[in-house]
Image: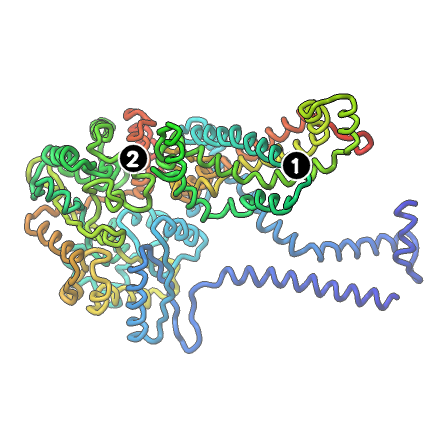
Amino acid sequence: MRADESIGRRKLLKAGGASLATVGLMAAGCGGGSGSGSGGTVTLRHAWWGGEPRAVAIKKCIALFEKKYPKIKIQPEFTDYAAFWEKFQTQAAGGNPPDVFQNAVGFLRKYDKRGVLMDLNSQIKAGNLSLDGFRNGVEANGQVDGKQLGIPVGANTMSLVIDNKIFEKAGIKPEFGWTWDEYFDALQHIKDTQKIAGDTGYFGIMYLYDLYLRQNGKAFFTDTGLGFTEDDLIPWWEDGYKRVKSGVVCDPKKVAQVAPKSALSAGLAASEFTWDNFSVRYAGEGHPNIGLAPIPTVDGKDTGQYLGSLMLSISNKTKYPKEAAQFIDFMVHDPEVGKIMGYDRGILPTDEQYEAYTPSDDQNKAIAAFEEACQKEGVLGKITPHPSGADVAEAAFLRIAGDMSQGKTKVNAAVKQFFNEAKAAFAA
Amino acid sequence: MTLVKDTPVLAPSERSSGPAAAKRRGRRESLAGYLFMSPWLAGFLLLTAGPMVASFYYAFTSYNLFTSPQWVGLDNFTAMFEDPRWRKSVEVTLKYVVIGTPLKLLLALGVALLLAQSRRGQGLYRAAFYMPSLIGASVSVGFVWRALFSDNAIVDSGLKAFGWNLGGWIGDPDLVLYSLVALTVWQFGAPMVIFLAGLKQVPRELYEAAEVDGAGPLRRFWSITLPMISPVLFFNVLLETIHSFQIFGSAYVVSDTSCGPADGTLVYTCYLYQKAFKETQMGFASAMAWMLLLAVALVTAVLFWSQKKWVHYEEGAK
């Protein structure tokens, strides 16, 4: 009886110990990240956001890289834009960010302030990463306060995406230097003759309002905050509201219903402002006949445009800065990578890649032609800075403009709310 | 027979006896008990209790996940009341709870009353009505809902046939919430099953006696059924109310993750999520979570207090 009992107890202790060990293992498993495997190979995690075509292309590039650098393995992680930053900030806060990740201008100061980004100047000096051969000086897009926080993988600019067929039928031919008045008259004409809204909701797009402000000698952001006043924004939104009411701009109710598909692809409007390289999405969403048109101007000349960039950054926590830098160097300079990626992330950033790739499909040809035209017209200016919190301010701008356009918030109140939320975003 | 008297019989010991040995044995046994519980206990401490204590602390700080939390006292709580979006989220959630919960329970009770009568194929009917409760919370149903309530889709064209030209609900900030209400009402199966169990417990002889006394069906329902199932009704009201306050998934999916349009589906947890993971204001989000807990606790307390007035427990059943 007693013997039985003690065996029982021993078993019991074992069982308890095993379960504790399991918990311990689980905890250990969570901490597993990048590291060196057998034979001195190094594994780096590379994370990005984007659609399926981008994922396929980047994986091909990774295979090329691993062939050239057999001692470095790249582990891909990808998701869509919104999920990317939620995941990234959780990983980064937990001390486990990806080694190399896609980045954008609006996030540099935010994650620099949070101590996440590596200053790549040390790697450039060490010769692991070259800043030579970047076109139009886009490498400057990754520079903040003398630090090189990202290396551009492309260059893009804002454009007016139009439904060619509708514009043709309405007899409208947008040209560089056309004014806002001419643009809105054109939308009115489209609405009257083609029975379709002209635009999908221009007034909520932060990067378009930025261009309008730049045309007026201001900008959306300064280093630390907003570069305009409440009085600037009120007429922009008041006009937007009026145009929604009159049907020149698409009913936001309809736009919300087709999301995440673009309202332009859904055939709800004839044009939409967005980055030129995003125009490939419309073909993917089943809209065959898309063209790129110039941004309207205030003075008949200045569009306020500049070249923006997606880029690659390295986390401060990486154990292999040299290998990570070599990977970025490969991704921005290797001609084969240029051929594979095309203009998915914008016009290719370096001479080597730009020359290696010749667009063959209509959409990529149109992007190349548009940026060439922008160069020729001399409308591309210098990019203005983005403060920490620019991403949150951009999202708030879009959302509050939506509330306003639905008539749920009066324009004055909406503007006040945006300024409050932006202030909180910059402080966070 | 008491438990103490039982103990020596259950675990006899030859050499050691007396209170000291019993104490030692008790300690060993409780140690074994804790070891058995350890997987659950570790989960509770690491994944529930720990985060709760931490979030209570964060509620009084400004915390962006990266820099260490700054103590701000009650600022997060006062900021909440000044925040128009927070007030909007409270309004949206209350609307959802106050409209959705009673409708769902009424439907559940109604269908349960119909299904309580024995008839052929009743198992099939019960399963069919219960089914939405199993699949209703899934993401795919959220997408189906988006399709059902869009322009010229089934709901819109159905209403048009009756002369109601409302347009799609999904894009309308004033109507979109009702599509969520419809979604929760559609999942009436879970409370229905509980009602059914309750209805089966009502003694038949009460109805027979009432019938002999000449009570009609309505009278029987008010005077017998309702009082007899009031404990079950109370249970359902409590459960569904608490559940409704925590709505997240359907609002998130039906609005295409925006909780819009124009904050039309900005339910409380959705705003909490946006504050925490989109704007990384963890302090504010933690404070919001504790406010929700407080509110739900308050509502629960009121319900418990009110049950004295309307819930009848059988004599002797306590």
From this viewpoint, is residue B281 visible? Answer: no
> Can you tell which mark lies on residue B195?
1
Q: Name the residue type under label 1.
A: Phe
- Give left or right: position of B127 versus B178: right
Query: Callout 2: residue from which chain?
Result: A
Please tell me whether residue A397 is drawn above or below residue A49 in the rendered image. above
Label count reads 2
- Residue on which disc 2 sits: A252
Query: Callout 1: residue from which chain?
Result: B
> Can you tell which mark lies on residue A101?
none
Q: According to the image, what is the colour scheme of the structure?
A: rainbow
Q: Name the residue type under label 2.
A: Pro
Q: Residues within 10 Å of mark 2 (few under 14, many from 20)?
A: many
**C-alpha gap between disc 2 and disc 1:** 43 Å
Q: Where is residue B280 shown, x and y percent of the image?
A: 41, 43
Element class at badge 2:
helix
Respond whether the residues carrying marks 2 and 1 are from the same subunit: no
Res A18 quadrant in image: bottom right
Residue B271 versus residue A31: which sits nearer the camera? B271
Q: Where is residue B283 shown, x and y percent of the image?
A: 47, 39
Please tell me whether residue B256 is drawn above or below residue A328 in the rendered image. above
**Quarter placement of the N terminus of chain A:** bottom right
Residue A205 versus residue B218: which sits nearer the camera? B218
Q: Where is residue A51 shown, x and y percent of the image?
A: 31, 56
Residue B9 versus residue A115: which sits nearer the camera? B9
- Give left or right: position of A222 versus A100: left
Please tell me whether residue B78 is drawn above or below residue A76 in the rendered image. above
Q: Which residue is most to the bottom?
A: A39
Tag in front: 2 or 1? 1
Identify the residue at image location x=71%, y=65%.
Answer: A14
